[in-house]
Each structure stands twice: as C-alpha cells, then as structure tokens.
C-alpha cells in the first residue's frame, strides 16, 4: 500500500522532502556542502559577521 503525502509520518516526510520539488542537476538528493568559503579564528567574529557587527578585514 502506497501512502499519500497526507498520511506519512513527519520524519518520513522530512527525509523525502528533497524529492518534492525536483533536484538541480538531475541528482537523487541535494548535495551536502561540508565546507565554507570563509574562515574566522574566533567564533565571536563569525557570529559578528552574520549579525553585522564584525569590523575585521
């Protein structure tokens, strides 16, 4: 028996949510990016960058 989106459990819906709207590059799952293009020596500076208070260069 195939379940409809209305009867699936929340966890099942979350696991398969990437298939609902299609995926770029015809992949099965969306890629997971495990790195970033920025680097901060202190976590406070990283937080400041996202809050707009970081004054470093």
Image (tube, grey):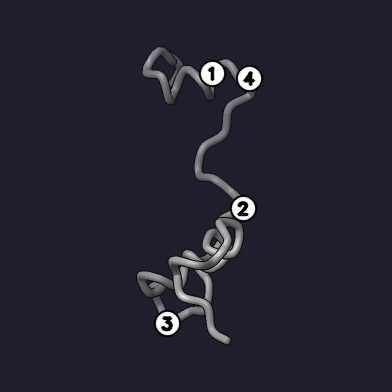
In front: mark 1 or mark 2? 2
**Contact between labelled residues 2 and 1, with CB atoms less than 8 Å apart:** no
Q: Which residue is mark 2?
A: 34
Residue shown at 51% from the left, 21% from the top = 47
Disc nearer the start of the sequence (1/2): 2
Give the class, few, some or many, for how many residues have Cα within 10 Å of label 1's Cα (few <14, many ≥20): some
| Label 2–label 3 contact, CB within 8 A | no
* Residue 26 numbered mark, or none: 3
Label of residue 29 in the image: none
Q: Which residue is mark 4?
A: 42
- Mark 3 or 1, nearer chain start: 3
Q: Position of residue 26 (x, y in %)?
A: 42, 82
Q: What x and y, as percent, mark residue 29?
A: 53, 72
Compared to 30, does 35 lie above or below? above
Q: Do residues under tags 1 and 4 come within 8 Å of each other at their CB atoms?
A: yes
Ranked by sequence position, the earlier of labels 3 and 4 is: 3
Tell me the CA gap for discs 1 and 4: 5 Å
């Amino acid at each position: 028996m195939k379940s409809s989106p209305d009867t699936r459990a929340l966890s099942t819906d979350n696991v398969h949510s990437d298939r609902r709207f299609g995926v770029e590059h015809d992949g099965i799952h969306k890629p997971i990016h495990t790195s970033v293009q920025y680097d901060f020596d202190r976590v406070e500076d990283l937080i400041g960058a996202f809050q707009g208070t970081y004054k470093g260069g």
